[in-house]
Structures are given as structure tokens and as C-alpha cells.
Amino acid sequence: MYTTHILNNGIRVILSKLEQYRSTSIGLWIKTGSIDETEENNGISHFIEHMLFKGTSKRSARDIAEAFDSIGGDLNAFTSKECTCFHAKVLDRHIDIAIEIIADMINDPLMDTEDIKLEKSVVLDEIMMAEDTPDDVSYDLISKVIYHDGTLSRPILGTKETLDSINQDIIKKHLDDYYTTDNLVISIAGSFDEETIINLLNQHFTMPESSHKNHKEKNYFHSDSSFVYRDIEQVHLEIGYEGMPYSSDEIFNLAALNNILGASVSSRLFQNIRESKGLTYSINSYLTQYEDNGLFSVYASMHVSNLKLVCDLIKIELDKLLKDGLEEKEFLRVKEQLKGNYILDLEGTDSYMNLIGKGHLFDIKIRVPDEVEAAINNIKKSEVEALMLKILSSKPSIALVGRVDQKLLDECTSVIGG
């Protein structure tokens, strides 16, 4: 399914040849995100992601955009709490263009002072847009509640105050600290000649070999609660339990529990609270995984008048799971559901590029579809129930966003956490 290589300067490469496609996807993965930031430079990883599109000594931002448009390709990027990724998808015959341009963006970014000023305005708009999106606010709030002042508590976008403080020196320091050859992974999936690809990567990624010396601080789960008052129509509720890191051997057991509780339209929370009682439009459970820890969360949005009842009903569903366990029919259905979810998610070169790139960056076991199917077939009902008891019997954290106050928060906390 894939082969691994090391470039002459130490950059790790992982390749997955998929000859059934005419496209090729490439990702440049950098192991840095808001987890590596301080209170003073929070948002710098995301800001650098933006700035690398602003041009190099050889080409302007417009040149970069036109180069991909002229071949019908796509170039984009994202920043998470733990990594930054620049990725492109092109026809296989144009992979050399994608490699050369991404390498140029990384090797020789301009970081012009006027561009920095202009991009601050763009990112400020992005921060304000997130502030106007209540579910984004609730997600950031539950991270703050759970991780207190730990690095995982910090928003990916940063804040207006930290954005104002960014300058060329701060950018250069972060690039020097984290954009190092031993902190990068290149993943490529699709139609290509392996020898040609390695030669192209060695030719264009000319960064000198370097050693990454930064160490992440440990983040710990805290059971706590908080609210943010917003004059909006709905209340947004987040319930967070301690979950598991990428490396956990129980990832498929956790995924099964997630799908049974709230990750699908046939799940207990969706059917019993949304469909049967019509108390909330959105209700679901979801997983968040990091290198060293993770979260198992429940999210719901509703009118404030329904908040207490929704909390009561969520607690009833959680208690029923803990008391009665899983139904056999339900368990068998969710195994088939998981196989479809995982395998269908791997359709396309960009999906494989993400799978192998992130897996190689964080040393996550990379499974081909047959291995995924076998692992899901081996899930045991008793093991899922044991994991369920471990997670859902612990004391969660709770966050509310909307027309709420401390009294409402205390009521929800006493119901869910009691």
C-alpha cells in the first residue's frame, strides 16, 4: 500500500501508489500547531499558513494561484492544534509542478511587511467569523474548560491581541523552530513513478538538514464547567469526557461507542432526543484525538427553554447504556456501519494522502481497507462495554454558550455530572 523514504536532507516521505486514478495528491505536513504556542504568540502557526501563500522570490501570490488554475489543480492548507498541512491535488502529469511550487513556498517565503499587515486584516475577519459562530465558540470553550491553561486550550486562530503582536521576528523564530527537516513529512498518493517522485523531491526541497529541539508540555484533563453569555436564539451545550490518543489500541471500540451513542442518525441520542421528542435540531457525539490524549464529547443546540430537559434526557441515555449495555442487534449494525464509514472515507487520492501523511507524522498505525475490515470484525461487545464504563462513568466537563447564566450551568452540571 505504501513505501517510506528519507530525502537527502532528512525529510521523511511516504508514498502510496494508486494506479486506478489519474490524479495525484501531495501533502506537506509540519508537526506544529497551537499546541506549540505560548500565550504571547498564540495563532502564529495559522498565520504562517496564510503567509506562505503570499509569494516567494520567484513568484507572487497571483502567480501561485494562476499556476494551479492553469492546470485545473487545487492548492490549499489547514492548521490544527498539532499540525499544519499544505496540500495539492493535480492530474498525474502535473505532479512536478505541484512539488516545485510547494517546495518554493516552504524554501523561500517572502514574509513582506506589507503582506503581513494585509493578512492580519484577513485573519482578523476569520477570528471574528469564528466568534460569530456559536458552535465554534462552544468548542473553544470546552477546550479551555478541560485543559485550563495548557497548550491544547488555546484557539487555533489566536486572538485579536496576539494577532496584533505578530511581526517578522516572531514569524522567523517559529519557522526556524518548527519548519525543520526532521519535523516534516511529505505524503503522496495516486498515479506516479516512484523513482521520478523521489528525484523531484530531492531536487526541490533543498532545506538544510536540521534538528528539532522543542518539547511539548503535558496537557491534563480537568473536570470543570463554564459558560459564555451570547444574545442568540439557541443554547449550545458541550459535554467532554476524557478520551484516547491516536496510538490507542481501542480506537475501533471507541468508534463503535461513538456511533452507537451519537455519531449517526440512527444513534441513541439522535433518535431518542431529536427525532422522537423534537427538542433539538443538532445533537451528536464526536471524538477528538491528539498525540498524547483525547476527548469523547457530546454536543447539542436547542432553545434555552429545552436545555434542562435535554440535559435530563442525555443523562437518561448515558445511564441506560451504563446499566443495560449494548443490544446485540445494535452492536452488529454498528460494526457494518463502521466498515462502510472507514472504507468509503478512503475513496480518492486526497483521502489516502491524508491517511498516510498524518499517520507517518504522528506514528499512527496505517491500515489498508482489508486491515480495517478485519479489525472491525474483531471488535467484541464486551470490550466496547468495558470501555464505555471507563469513559462514561468518569466526571465530565461542561460548557454552555447562549442566553445562560451560572444557575443554568449549575443545573446542567448537577444533572450530567451527578
Image (spheres, rainbow, N blue to C red):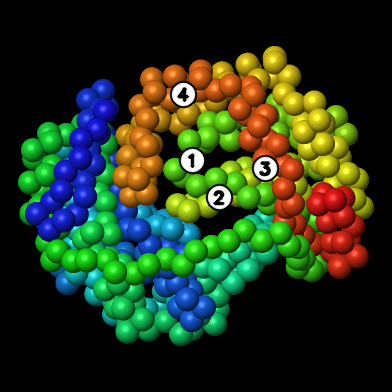
Label 1 and label 4: CA atoms lie apart by 13 Å
Amino acid beneath label 2: Gly
Q: Which residue is mark 1?
A: 248
Q: Which mark is residue 119?
A: none
First along the sequence among labels 3 and 1: 1
Q: Position of residue 164 (x, y in %)?
A: 48, 83
Q: Position of residue 215 (x, y in %)?
A: 37, 67
Q: Which residue is mark 4?
A: 375
For residue 205, which quarter of the picture?
A: bottom left
First along the sequence among labels 3 and 4: 4
Amino acid beneath label 4: Ala
First along the sequence among labels 2 and 4: 2
> Residue, x 12% and y 58% (percent of image)?
9
Q: Which residue is mark 2?
A: 294
Please report contact status of discs 3 and 1: CB closer than 8 Å, yes or no. Answer: no
Amino acid beneath label 3: Ile
Label 2 and label 4: CA atoms lie apart by 21 Å
Q: Nearer the viewer, mark 2 or mark 1?
A: 1
Q: Position of residue 268 (x, y in %)?
A: 75, 30
